[in-house]
Image (cartoon, helix red, strand yellow):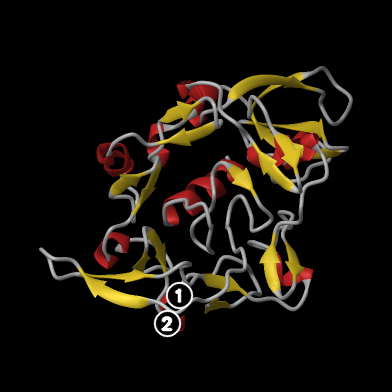
Amino acid sequence: MRTFGLLVVLLTACPPADGGTASEPPTTSSTTAATETGTSPTSSSTAATTTTGTSGESTTTGAEAKRCQSQCDNDRDCRIGGGDLGFRCIDGLCLYPDCTSDAQCLAELSGWKNPCAGPSECATGEACVLVADAGRCALTPGTFACADFGLVEKMLPAFDGGPDVTVCGQAVATCEAGACQSPCAGDEACQAQTGHPVCDVPSGRCVCQIDQDCLDSGLPGYTQCVAGRCGCAIDSDCAGGQNVDTCYAGVCGCAADPTCTVTIFDGAPLVCQ
């Protein structure tokens, strides 16, 4: 399953964070910096390094984390494995453009990234369906149930005009102020492996309730639950994550350019800023 294989690789590279980095994809909304690779531009803030009272390990405080950001000259630089997954070179960074329709958000937040013109262009276990006026490869229930991915079964027309196809997608996806949103309506929409297994219905956000929710995810940088979000406490919590080595006020980021070793896009080198 090519699409979800990419998602798994990127999601496990480093834990999702609301700010998103080159290795920390947001999982609840797409705010141009990319649902999958999150490279949102953030301003560098002066940070101070402190130590914890018991372990003596360092953590970095500051308003915003320094991130490994993918710098580009043109849209081709922002391809992944030679494929165009929708990222564009915007203001010198590989970003996902603002959304323009709910249908587009359904495709993006459901993981239907690969374009197609027929079933032969999709991987085994996927179907080529019509969504947002284009063909997209979408996961179909089979060996795994849609619920295993925190998704639901949806009927969509086949791109080639054949019978409607059952695929796995988000229950709700909307475009709001240029950002894709997928509010949860119940715990079943919140995957335990993301560290946020509980749905806060009023806000529509998947949240953690206790530190163990975060620890159970096994994701680097997820050791404590603060105000419903998983994060790090000290720099060593970020060990095992890609392109991160420093804990900035609960979010894993980079200390300097040498931290940025794993590139995401074909022609976009990473810089810590």
Checking the image for residue 129, the label placed there is none
Residue 145 visible from this viewpoint: no
The image quarter in which residue 96 lies: bottom right
Q: Position of residue 112 (x, y in %)?
A: 68, 40
Identity, as a three-letter code, of the amino acid under mark 1: Thr
For the point 48% across and 34% down, the residue is: 206
Query: For the N terminus, which image quadrant?
Result: top right
For the point 64% across and 55% down, the residue is: 34
Is 155 rendered above or below residue 251? above
- Secondary structure beneath label 1: loop
Q: Position of residue 240 (x, y in %)?
A: 32, 61
The image quarter in which residue 191 lies: top left
Q: Position of residue 53 (x, y in %)?
A: 13, 65
The image quarter in which residue 167 lies: top right
Q: Nearer the viewer, residue 109 or 203?
A: 203
- Give the residue number, with chain letter if any, for mark 1: 261
Q: Nearer the viewer, residue 230 or 150?
A: 230
Identity, as a three-letter code, of the amino acid under mark 2: Pro
Is 235 rendered above or below residue 190? below
For the point 36% across and 69% down, the residue is: 61
Checking the image for residue 258, the label placed there is 2
Crowd rating for badge 2 (residues with CA inside 10 Å; few <14, some 14–19, many 20+): few
Question: Taking 166 as reference, is 43 left or right?
Answer: left
Do the numbered discs 2 and 1 sit on residues whose CB atoms are within 8 Å?
A: yes
Question: Taking 219 as reference, is 137 left or right?
Answer: right
Q: Position of residue 256 (x, y in %)?
A: 43, 81
Question: Taking 76 as reference, is 142 left or right?
Answer: left
